[in-house]
Image: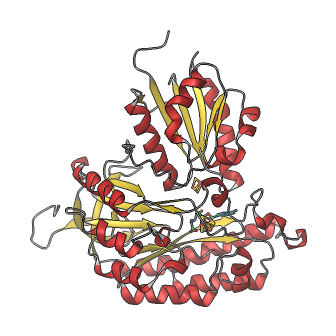
Amino acid sequence: MSSVVRTVYVETYGCQMNVSDSELMLGKLAAEGYAPVDSPDGADVILVNTCAIRDHAEQRVIGRLGELKRSMKPGSIVGVTGCMAQRLGPRLLTQAKHVSLVVGPDGYRALPQLVARAQGGAREVATSFDLEEHYEDFAPRRFDKVKAWIPVQRGCDYKCTYCIVPYTRGPERSRKLADAVREAEQAVADGIAEITLLGQTVNSYHDGTHDFADLLRAVGAVPGLRRLRFTSPHPNDFSDRVIAAMAEVPAVCEHVHLPLQSGSTSVLKRMLRRYTREEYLDCVRRLRAAIPGLGLTTDVIVGFPGETDADFEETLSVVREVVFDDAYTFKFSPREGTPATRMPSELTVPDEVATERLERLIETVRTGSRARNLTLLGSRREVLVEKLARRGELLQTRSRDFKTVLIGGDESLIGRYVNVELTGTTGSTFTGSVVSDRGALPVAS
Ligand code: SAH
Ligand code: SF4
Ligand code: F3S
């Protein structure tokens, strides 16, 4: 017999877009009477929302699916959703016999029906794209009480030659501005302190009437919203209008995640990134000129087919010239069906070369950010208290320029803004002490 209240567990891999999609799926199933639970053990519905960006991400999920077999009770179903579901489709059903549901990123509207059919013994695959789908009528069940992810664009039209995302998420489409603003208003009414707008090339947002500059101004004007962020922008879509909106809207935080991928124009060309090394550097200059104190983070890939030592040195030189506050660094991972896999095999960079380049890149990023961070000691920041830090009694907070600052204090500060002085740094993260210009602690909104 099934229990009275059916339960659902969702486990999320990959980017913030997937976190946001998991929140939509949970919201949809909660509206159908499912109770979300924190553990897969004995849940009626177990969903694994997956990422396909690199082979490593997929191997983790394959391993995890095997483990989840042990959490199943008679009658539970396991579903795979997200980018790997879209990429592999029915192949997943053959590979994992205990999986009975495979649903891609545009298929979540039918989730309750698909789940019901799977519970009845069917094995379902739903991987059609739907260019109208934004899940407007879904009420997300947010995992985080402090910060909200708000998707404003789905899919990607850029088709960088290494990337699987255009195939797993389909063509780019933007949500209507009014719908995004409504969700932001609701989030603020629910007590959310910071909003991040999401899209694969979020600053190419265009809903037919409004561009990304309009969107920043409209969401930034939501009463009570103190912090607005967005990720990930594409360097080509930073129009003067967008940069002016960032500089002028007080809520927009002084931080940009600006994926570089490579510092070599010839590699960038083969990646189909559509900018040169000089154009990237020019974008950085325009952003820094307009927004004082801008924090800058990036993504870099090493070992792309044909990357020579000289190309890699050009990447290092951009990293030294820009001095990023942080970087996510990756070894190129060939993705089936992407143009990069069709490049001549003699262009393949040997794994030991890519590994060595990755280590040098990480060291170069660290050297720059450590030097920058040391100069910030003694300066003051407003931080938002996000959660308990992983270790110890400290609280984890974030500044507007995206620095992680650990401070002392009790849990009642979570979700509040305080002013801190940066007192120490590991090189990447900071410790800070709460200060107040008026002598009263803490200064909170
Ligand atoms: N839409 C975002 C990035 C999404 S994927 C953007 O364009 O910036 C996140 C990062 O994963 C990318 O920026 C890239 O650095 C990395 N990545 C994507 N495909 C990859 C691959 N095949 N191998 C290694 N890294 C990859
Ligand atoms: Fe992938 Fe390029 Fe689109 Fe980013 S812009 S999601 S890297 S294809
Ligand atoms: Fe991964 Fe899909 Fe995001 S491939 S990075 S979960 S868009």
Classify residue 414 as left or right of residue 139.
left
Residue in the foreground of this view, choosing between 307 and 85: 85
Question: In the image, what residue occupies the spot 32% across and 49% down?
Answer: 393
> Taking 55 as reference, is 158 left or right?
left
Residue 430 shows in the view: no
| Quarter holding residue 361 | bottom right
Q: Say if 152 sits above or below 428 in the image.
A: above
Residue 345, x across and y down, in percent: 89, 68
Residue 47 spot, x, y in % from top left:
55, 35
Q: Residue at x 23, y 61 (%)?
A: 417
Q: Is residue 265 above or below residue 221?
A: below
Residue located 76% across and 33% down the image: 94
Taking the view exactly as shown, the residue that stands out farthest to the top is 1
Residue 170 in the image: state x and y as whole percent.
Answer: 61, 57
Q: Quadrant of ligand 2?
A: bottom right
Residue at horizontal 36 percent and vertical 54 percent from the top:
148
Above or below, 152 relative to 313: above
Q: Height in image: 267 above or below 84?
A: below
Q: How many marks?
A: 0
Q: Position of residue 277 (x, y in %)?
A: 63, 87
State whether residue 102 appears in this view.
Answer: yes
Asked if residue 9 lies left or right of residue 375, the reply is: right
Query: Based on the displayed image, in which of its 4 quarters is residue 260 positioned?
Result: bottom right
Q: How is the image coloured?
A: secondary structure
Task: Give the position of the C terminus as an image quadrant.
Answer: bottom left
Q: Is residue 94 left or right of residue 29?
A: right
